[in-house]
Amino acid sequence: MSRRRRAALAAASKGAASRDRAVRERAASRDRAVRERAAFERAAARRRAAARAVTGRAVADAAGMALGYALDAALGDPRRFHPVAGYGKLAAALERRTYADDRAAGLRHVGIAVGVPVALAGAAAFATRRRPVLRALVTAALTWTVLGGTSLRREARAMSSSLADGDLAAARRRLPHLAGRDPSTLDSAELARATVESVAENTSDAVVGPLVWGAVGGLPGLVGYRAVNTLDAMVGHRSPRYARFGTAAARADDLANLVPSRLTALLTVATAPTVGGSPARTAWVWLRDGNRHPSPNSGQCEAAVAGALAISVRERPAPAQLVRAAEPGFLAFVAALAVIVAAAGEHGLESAIDSLVPHGEGEKKSLGTRDFDGVKADGTQVTHTIPAGAIGNEKPIAIVSERWFSPELQLVVMARTSDPRSGVTTYRLTNLKRGEPPADLFKVPSDYRVGERRGG
């Protein structure tokens, strides 16, 4: 074969090999693109499924908590075999094994008593992650178990009735249902004060706190919060036995209630008008007195409730001085506030405060026009009268409110409320100033010159 022929064959063979290699590379590239596309679609499908699962769990948790709240509102706490009472018995049995007069033993006790139920709740949450209906039912059952707003209201209203009837013995028998105090030496005013303080604090502990932690942590959040709160009630006090052992439980409860207690106070400010209170006064009393309590949380709720109900706050607002029980009948009023704070205006308000809030528009009277620092305002006086005996009062109670509204400024420049039960509350805008801008603001400076612009 000639040299030229061999060269032609070699070139042809080389070209064929090159074409084959290009074909294989294109096929491999297509296969790689197909695999990458399939992997991308699988990953996208997993992300969509995860998003749907998260959304489904969130919806199930929200529906379950709403159903649990409705069960508590309708039924209150279980009369027998309450799960929290059962947990308390188990915690007491555990304490007999873990107790020692030191903080380390208390920390171990809290770790076991809280960790085990939280782990069980976490297992239940994991098992129901793809079963939204079952998850909602489990959440509803746990929410009903850990809430206590309805029972709190019932006990406070029962205490109100006992005090209004003058049955001091019955009132003393009821107090242990609300507060851990010895009632044997308390008179009616002290019993009323203890009840108000307990309702204010337990609005956070028994209603707002569980709902906050349930919203944040789901089933483990609900169970963990109630476990911590129960342990604090059992061992978190400064008795000789628990001064050191109960430190961990007390600190855990303080930490768990930092947000719920302040949210309770904030909701009290927002809903104060629904119980005849002033949001401005409620916020002022809360901010002024909320941190003057030995507990970092209890004072927040008690101060806000005192401000919302316009109850006297003394010079030294210690826990027992935050509120003054002037009328036994206002206890049901405070209990209604607990439900308002929990539900943020949901059902049940009218029936809870029906006999305590003055009804109707009252007797209106025009006060004419008055000048406030050069601002004209129109005054209106409204008088509400609570008939004798409506809330245990011997004589009618006249509540007189003044309101001075400026049409020019479109705001209230002064308001005053006179209530024989709480005194006079006055709100007024001060330092109102009017006038034209100074004349020299528009005066052309003497050294100002206008020159001609020359083109370049």
Image: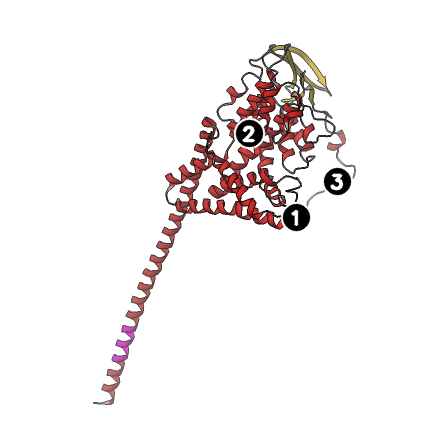
> What secondary structure is found at the residue carrying circle 2?
helix
Residue 34 visible in the snapshot: yes
Mark 3: give few (<14), some (14-19) or many (20+) Cα within 10 Å.
few
Residue 323 percent location from the top left of the image:
67, 26
Q: Which residue is mark 2?
A: 341
Q: Which residue is mark 1?
A: 455
Task: Describe residue 28's horizontal placement relative to residue 188 as left or right.
Answer: left
Query: Compared with residue 245, is residue 431 higher up or lower down, i.e. above or below?
Result: above
Extreme front residue here?
96
What is the three-letter code of the residue carrying label 2? Answer: Val
Please name whichever residue, 63 or 252, is drawn nearer the observer in this view of the structure.
252
What is the three-letter code of the residue carrying label 3? Answer: Arg
Foreground disc of the pair 1, 2: 2
Determine the CA span between mark 1 and mark 2: 74 Å
Q: What is the number of callouts on the image?
A: 3
Determine the CA span between mark 2 and mark 3: 67 Å
> What secondary structure is found at the residue carrying circle 3?
loop
Task: Describe residue 29's horizontal placement relative to residue 138 as left or right.
Answer: left
